[in-house]
Image (spheres, rainbow, N blue to C red):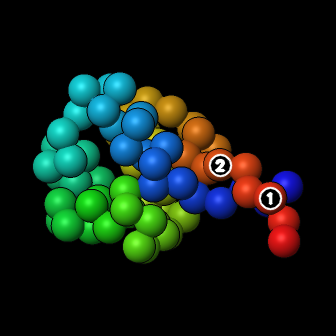
Amino acid sequence: MARRFSGQHLRAMRTAAGISRTRLAAAVHRCEHTVYLWERGRVTPSANALAQVADALGCRPDDLFAEEACA
């Protein structure tokens, strides 16, 4: 099993924390549209951005990844 960034996990963690997309974007010094793209899985955040997001959400970067079956 491979691990891959999950926009769905990001969105779930953000909403569970009660943080708006706008507030998360401000906390990680990115625009709201970038967070939107991350959550939709259209763009993968850099390692630095992942660390900032995890810090802002009070979780580990690993929490933003999902198991993916190998083809």
Left or right: 54, with 66 as reference point: left
Q: Which mark is residue 31?
A: none
The spot of residue 21 in percent (x, y) is 21, 47
Secondary element at image label 1: loop
- When the figure is inspected, residue 36 is found, relative to residue 14, above or below; the finding is below
- When the figure is inspected, residue 38 is found, relative to residue 56, above or below; the finding is below
Which kind of residue does numbered mark 1 sit on? Ala
Q: Residue at x 73, y 50 (%)?
A: 67
Pointer 2: residues within 10 angstroms few (<14), some, or many (20+)?
A: some
Q: Residue at x 37, y 44 (%)?
A: 11
Q: Residue at x 14, y 49 (%)?
A: 22
Residue 46 visible in the current orientation: yes
Total number of numbered labels? 2
- Residue to which mark 1 is pinned: 69
> Closest to the observer: 21 or 60?
21
Left or right: 68, with 42 as reference point: right
Q: Nearer the viewer, mark 2 or mark 1?
A: 1
Q: Which mark is residue 66?
A: 2
The spot of residue 65 in percent (x, y) is 61, 50
* Residue furthest out toward the front: 71
Which kind of residue does numbered mark 2 sit on? Ala
- For the C terminus, the image quarter is bottom right
